[in-house]
Amino acid sequence: MPTTLTLLTLVLATTATAADSSPSSLIGWAPEPDGRGTFGLLCSCVLTLTICVWTALHLNVPAARSTVRSRGIERIKWVLYGIFAPEIVVATAAAQYIVARWLKREIEKDASHRRGSSGDDKGTGDDHLSRHTWDMTQCFYAVMGGFVIDRPAYGHEAGVERVTITPEGIRLLSFVGKLPEIHESQIQDKSKADWMAKSLVCIQAGWMVAQVVGRLIESLPVSLLEINTCGHVVCAVLLYLLWWSKPLDVLDPTVLGERHDDVLSLMSACSSMSAVGGVTDIRCFVYSPAGSVDESEVELKGNGGQEDGKVLVTTHLSIGSPGSRDPSRFLGFDIGDLRPRPMPATIYEHPRRAPRAAYEYHIDQANPTVSPECLRTYFAPPYDSNNLRHSTIYCRRKFPDVQQSKQPHVPMSLTLLTQASKAADALWSQCTGRPVYHTVYFTTVPGIGVFLGETDYVVPHVVNFPSMANLGLGQVNVHRDALRSVLALTAAAYGGLHSAGAGDRFPTPVERTLWLFASLVIACSGAVLWFFFLARQVWPRFDVFVSGAAPGARLAGLGQRGWVKIAKAWFFGFVMVVFGAARVFLVVEAFVSLREAPAALYETPEWSDFFPHFQ
């Protein structure tokens, strides 16, 4: 798509001055009978623009209690995104496509591994595990929030809440051999794809692009509105390609049943939805594999350094852990005692993640290390008989920031913990045979124990917009470099198309200058965002400046000065205003410029009337 827009940009740039725009040849409203008129031009462009954006949108499964009104508002909101910021919609589609492709590839790896293991003479005991694979339609169905679970609502024993499984959650189900079995035909029954409507849209879009190219070939002027519409048409075509396998307007998701209870309990415990006071209980639970040495029997030696009885230890965070973004908030140690410690293996396998993969800090065993609420609950039978049990050395709830929280602590239910412990055994067993995934699912602290890695396996609802976190430090499944590149190239091509098509067709020089400035802002916006989020990813100090807090600053009561925060807020606010104004101006000016246009604009190539289209 960026290539198509680039070619159209070059054609417009070389023919922009071909039209006669002398004052004597400028007219206002043109009637219909003698050729195409102003009303016909407006209708064809508005119709093409609207149906292209409307039909190209493939939104995610709506929230459980959504209404017809809320779904309509959501769709109108995205239509406006498609009109004023089409590259944002393209970036959203690209993010979903990248995640679906990643999920498909990971599922195929799991199936291939199990087929290879089944051929091993020694046997692995994996015969009961799933070996089927998914196609892109099934993966898109998962990415759009097609799988949900009903779990006990927080703080209500009898209440039930519906939550959605994320792509990471589906990938975990596949990894432990419990990938849901759903056929493509079942998904298509839920989808409301209308191929007749899409075919008519393609014909109308093809006519719009063909008549613009034809006018350029015959040296006839092209209106700004047509240029703007063509940009949206090409973006809509790319949306069709990216969302080709994505179901359309699915309202009823698939509810997973009892077969997945153990793994679903583990996913719920590891997700931020289970956090109380910003901390999940699972963060303090050590996993002891069957047959391993009990945690209480392990002598804490740390990494060879001691200061006044404090032992130096290192936490190796799991991939996708929220600790990668704010390690002090995750671990609880202040800025004076927490420092990065990249490991050679991480540097080799995940070079960009290495600076945020491991952190050193000191633990003082002389002081109480477990919070009172955890002591009362998790150190009494039957909580102390699971493979997942509370650590005797580390407790995140013991730190002052959590102790000061007014939110009451509700302990994890014994049923959920028992089920999560069984799932952890299955997960550990799979990681034993595929050690490269150990860093994905477990956080390790040598000398203390192994902890389950925290990732949002379940969320209240999968929103349509992937969030800016996916351009910086987000979930593990998004290839951020590819997503940033799509956004940068699409924005550059879209802005370049408008700037190259400017020529001298404007009623006033001021409008031409503003048009070129707005086009340049949009063309550069993608590249600016590309460098901005890349800098946050690879330059920790810049990320500290943007986020406003260094590791441990919040816990230590430190932070940026007030005037720095105010200056940043004003700067980012100014950038957003300029960015939004540029987009609105391009769309509005495309219509307003027709008040004074070249007379040749309303001449039509003879062949265009024979091309099927809506007028």
Image (cartoon, rainbow, N blue to C red):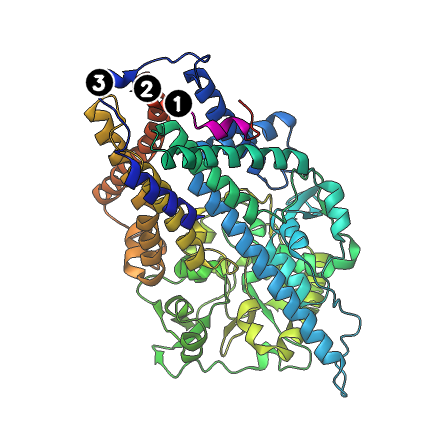
Q: Which residue is mark 2?
A: 599
| Label 1 element class | loop
**Residue placed at 65% from the left, 46% from the top?**
163
Q: Quadrant of residue 449?
A: bottom right
Asked whether the beta carbons under mark 3 and mark 2 sit within 8 Å of each other, the answer is no
Q: Which residue is mark 3?
A: 23
Q: Amino acid at mark 3?
A: Pro
Q: Which residue is mark 1?
A: 603
Q: Quadrant of residue 224?
A: top left
10 Å neighbourhood of mark 3: few (<14), some, or many (≥20)?
Answer: few
Q: Which sits in the foreground, 3 or 311?
A: 3
Cα–Cα gap, marks 2 and 1: 8 Å
- Which mark is drawn over residue 159? none
10 Å neighbourhood of mark 2: few (<14), some, or many (≥20)?
Answer: many
Can residue 85 be seen in the rendering of this structure?
no
Q: Is residue 292 magenta?
A: no
Say whether disc 3 or disc 2 marks the residue closer to the N-terminus. Answer: 3
**Residue placed at 69% from the left, 37% from the top?**
192
Q: Is residue 607 magenta?
A: yes
Q: Amino acid at mark 2?
A: Ala
